[in-house]
Image (cartoon, rainbow, N blue to C red):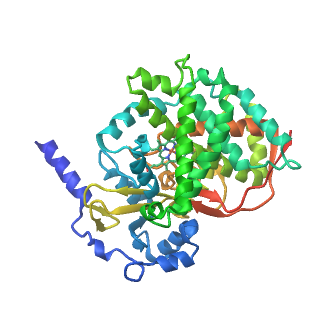
Amino acid sequence: MMLKLNRIKYVFHYNYSTNAKPFEEIPSPKGLPFVGTLFSFIAAGGSTQLHEYIDKRHQQLGIIFQEKLGPISSVFLNDAHEIRKVFVGEGKYPKHVLPDCWLLYNKIKGYQRGLYFMDGEEWFMYRRLLNDKLLKHDYYGHGIQNDYLLQKTFEIWLQNSKYGEIIDLENQLYYLSIIFMMSFTLGRSFHDNVDKFLPNVEKLALVVKDIFKWSVKLSILPATLASSLNLPVWNNFVTAVDESIKLTTDLLEGAELKASDGILYFLLDQNIPIDVAQRIIVDFLLAAGDTTALATLWILYLLGRHKNIQDELYSDIQKNRDSHETRLLRNIIKESMRLYPIAPFIARYLPQETEIASYLIPANHLISISVFNCSRNEKYFPKANKFEPKRWDRLANGKYAEVNDPYATLPYGMGARSCIGRNLSKVQISIIINKLIASYELEVRNEVGVKLNMVTTPSQPIKLFLKKR
Ligand code: HEM
């Protein structure tokens, strides 16, 4: 009985404190009726510069504010301690935001999707099953470390380069992401027939990229309007999604599952119906393609701009030939994702009224976590805008050298709905960077800024030059 009461007290204490202020008192910029602050948002560069806009708002209004940007009203938050409360309060079935155009596509086509689109008990069941496999560090399917395929790809990059400058770097990284995911999905069955798969993998890399291109353009207008007016942007989006799903389904159906080491085999072995297994994997491929490719791109950018750190990594790799992941490489990945988190915002709807930063947030009100902004906050990361992988070195007392709160940067999110592919993506990135640095020197000859295209992308193409060591 005592235990029960204590629990109730804890829950009560967590949701409210006696001096919690009402929602209406949350600081908010002045805006016009109906459109809110949409015009100042557009004048500040619109959705591609949302990170800068929100940063200024936090400076002006504090760690929490609410703003109505066009039709969307959200609370924004950039304090690590308060952000944790959001994840504590997200409940058994956390709810995130899905782009309008993707939801409309699924509705029109009657298409059911994978984990990212699932909710409630269905999501919980598949997530629990997959957590077991994907978040175990040692399970990645056979053959993911296909050195030969990687070395061949790098050689082709150099052969096709313009005086050493890699052509279409971003597309090339998308292509590698899809190869890794196919390897993870089919295991040895992929590698034994790799030449048969590669033409479709190449096509898939291009169309997956298009999905994001068109989703970004659609994000500024209601999807139903774009669809009912038959706008080219809507039709292009639909073509890209149709083709991605078709190519992925063809790749999976064309595979003869001779080996038991891929995730597809695992799912079928758990008696998951083939159509559900396929849609889970289609979404893995879509979720992995751009995120891992862009994360790798930003690491290449930073290494190409910091020759000293690159040299240090090279000697580290020489000393640790048995492993693709050295301590320094781990720190480089963390630091790069801190500076360039691929998902710049993470959103949640909480199932009950909750006190955050001393204000009461009503149930089901949109809360946007300013990941980009929080990751570059001096309070948590001294010299926050600098690329300093060594800040992640552990001291004798177990703390990080120059990180005041490691959870102030959340490149993969947090809690039950955080990225299920995080370990997989880190293995992929480590292998690519390790193999590349072991054989080539990198140089990036241009400085780029950030442009948000739903995900964090460079403002211009990165000019990466390779030279054989
Ligand atoms: C560097 C690479 C990656 C980054 C930065 C990244 C980031 C994220 C983030 C921020 C979320 C949302 C978390 C939230 O709402 O709390 C997410 C969800 C997700 N990611 Fe990743 N991701 C990456 C790679 C991958 C890969 C390789 C896969 C393939 C398995 C994947 C599959 C998913 C799925 C299925 C979800 C939805 C999970 C759910 O709703 O339960 N991601 N990812």
Left or right, 19 with reference to 301: left
**Quick check: can you spot residue 417?**
no
- Residue sitting farthest toward the top: 258
Which percent across, then down, holds residue 339? Answer: 61, 57
Which percent across, then down, holds residue 345? Answer: 48, 59
Quarter of the rendering containing residue 340: bottom right
Left or right, 419 with reference to 342: left
* Residue lying at 46% horizontally and 23% vertically, measured from the top left: 266
Towards the viewer: 441 or 323: 441
Which percent across, then down, holds residue 36? Answer: 41, 78
Q: Quadrant of the C terminus?
A: top right
- Residue sitting farthest toward the left: 1
Towards the viewer: 236 or 13: 236
* Residue lying at 27% horizontally and 64% vertically, measured from the top left: 362
Which percent across, then down, holds residue 275? Answer: 42, 31
* Residue lying at 26% horizontally and 72% vertically, measured from the top left: 22
Whether 295 is drawn above or below 252: the answer is: below
Whether 324 is drawn above or below 407: the answer is: above
Whether 206 is drawn above or below 65: the answer is: above
Towards the viewer: 159 or 75: 159
Whether 256 is drawn above or below 442: the answer is: above
Q: Quadrant of the N terminus?
A: top left
Left or right, 359 with reference to 402: left
* Residue lying at 58% horizontally and 61% vertically, measured from the top left: 452
**Quick check: can you spot residue 60?**
yes
Towards the viewer: 33 or 84: 33
- Residue sitting farthest toward the right: 163
Quarter of the rendering containing residue 433: top right
Quarter of the rendering containing residue 236: bottom right
